[in-house]
Image (cartoon, coloured by chain):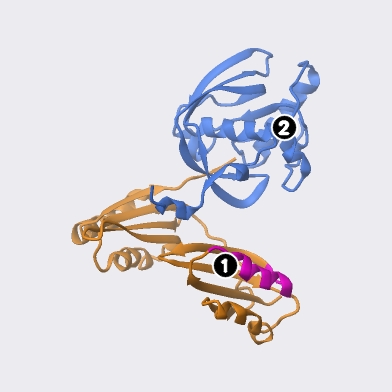
């Protein structure tokens, strides 16, 4: 069990493309545990991606069940994901996001409303999960980290865009 | 370091931002927060700037003369110490949409409901849209609700206004997803 420091931009590791996990060995289990511990220690944030703690492997953890927004919706509780991939997206909505790695800034980001995500879980089992709402947003946000994207790369509108005529 | 608020406004055209920021860059100014937008046919810029070389606006305001010559109005406000720092606002953001046939008092009446209750408006935009003979007024307000003030409560404040002004008002929480 280890709580890691959450990296903050401009740490270059946040802009790296992460590598797929080839072999699910103990070090991957340790990584998942570190991610969970770090997430919980950060006032139970709703997710952490491996590059945020300086590990450039494709792994994230998400748990919206403890957050004010996530509690209101059906959710899958703690999800530990290795080599996650979104294989289906539906709908689009704009959400205001913030990120532990980019403190004191929030932006409007367009995300899919519902997704199907495929991954290997902490028990090395293959999972395919459909989810929507806040949990889907959280997963999309964390998976972006694995490709070196921050929500800043996804900001779709300035506030004033609300008024732009079609 | 002394900070200044710089406001520039003038007929919109390409090149205003580059002309303004070239002067700031040449003088060695830092631009902290800024917001620039088109309002009507005017481009407006508001910037918080600072420069370790300057303690008073008199020392650099002449540098903006070329802007004035290009029909831009320039105003420099000298901030009091700490005036560049945003106070920590506690609470939850909400978004209030107000729209309806244009008539006097929409902004004032809605803002008064909030101001009288010490609700802080963090962002406000208005726009006149629709056809010339049927103008529609649209206002979006982002406000910080202190803890304990629910969306439903804000809606209840707006109910009478809806009737009186014959406008539509909706309130929703602007939850920031902290990830």
Is residue B79 visible to the viewer in this orientation of the structure? no
The residue to which callout 1 is attached is B16
Q: Quadrant of residue A101?
A: top right
Question: Is residue B89 shown in magenta?
Answer: no
Quadrant that contains the C terminus of chain B: top right
Circle number at residue A50: 2
Pinpoint residue B86: horizontal percent, then vertical percent.
Answer: 58, 65
Q: In the image shown, does B50 or B43 lie closer to the viewer? A: B43
B27 in magenta: yes
Q: Position of residue B63 (x, y in %)?
A: 66, 81
Q: Please tell me whether mark 1 sits on a helix, a strand or a loop.
A: helix
**Region of the chain picked out in magenta, as a range:** B14-30
* Residue at horizontal 35 percent and vertical 65 percent from the top: B111
**Which chain contains the residue that carries disc 1?**
B
Give me the chain that's orange. B
The image shows residue A44 at horizontal and vertical percentages of 61, 38
From the image, give the main secondary structure of the stretch colored magenta: helix
Kindly indicate which chain is depicted in blue in the rendered structure.
A
Depth order, front residue of B117/B172: B172
In the rendered image, which quarter is residue A150 located in? Answer: top right
User: In this picture, is B121 found above or below B78?
Assistant: above
């Amino acid at each position: 069990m280890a709580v890691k420091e959450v990296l903050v931009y401009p740490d270059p590791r946040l802009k790296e493309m992460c590598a797929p996990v080839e072999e699910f060995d103990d070090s991957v289990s340790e990584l998942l545990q570190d991610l969970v511990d770090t997430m919980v220690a950060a006032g139970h944030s709703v997710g952490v991606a491996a590059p945020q703690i300086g590990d450039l492997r494709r792994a994230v953890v998400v748990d919206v069940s403890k957050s004010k927004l996530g509690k209101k919706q059906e959710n899958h509780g703690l999800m530990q994901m290795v080599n996650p991939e979104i294989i289906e997206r539906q709908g689009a909505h704009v959400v205001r996001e913030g990120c532990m790695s980019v403190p004191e800034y929030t932006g409007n980001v367009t995300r899919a409303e519902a997704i199907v995500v495929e991954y290997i879980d902490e028990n090395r089992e293959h999972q395919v999960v459909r989810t929507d709402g806040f949990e889907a947003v959280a997963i999309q946000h964390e998976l972006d980290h694995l490709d070196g994207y921050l929500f800043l790369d996804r900001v779709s509108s300035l506030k004033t865009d609300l008024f732009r005529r079609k | 370091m002394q900070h200044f608020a710089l406001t520039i406004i003038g007929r919109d055209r390409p090149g205003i931002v580059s002309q303004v920021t070239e002067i700031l860059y040449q003088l060695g100014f830092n631009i902290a927060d800024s917001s620039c937008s088109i309002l009507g046919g005017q481009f407006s810029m508001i910037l918080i700037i600072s420069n370790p070389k300057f303690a008073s606006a008199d020392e650099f305001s002449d540098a903006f003369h070329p802007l004035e010559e290009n029909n831009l109005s320039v105003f420099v406000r000298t901030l009091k110490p700490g005036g560049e720092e945003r106070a920590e606002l506690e609470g939850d953001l909400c978004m209030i949409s107000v729209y309806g046939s244009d008539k006097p008092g929409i902004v004032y009446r809605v803002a008064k409901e909030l101001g009288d209750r010490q609700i802080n408006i963090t962002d406000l935009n208005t726009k006149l849209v629709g056809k010339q003979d049927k103008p529609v007024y649209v206002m979006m307000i982002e406000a910080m609700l202190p803890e304990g003030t629910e969306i439903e409560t804000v809606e209840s404040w707006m109910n009478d206004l809806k009737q009186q002004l014959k406008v539509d008002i909706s309130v929703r929480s602007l939850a920031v997803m902290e990830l």
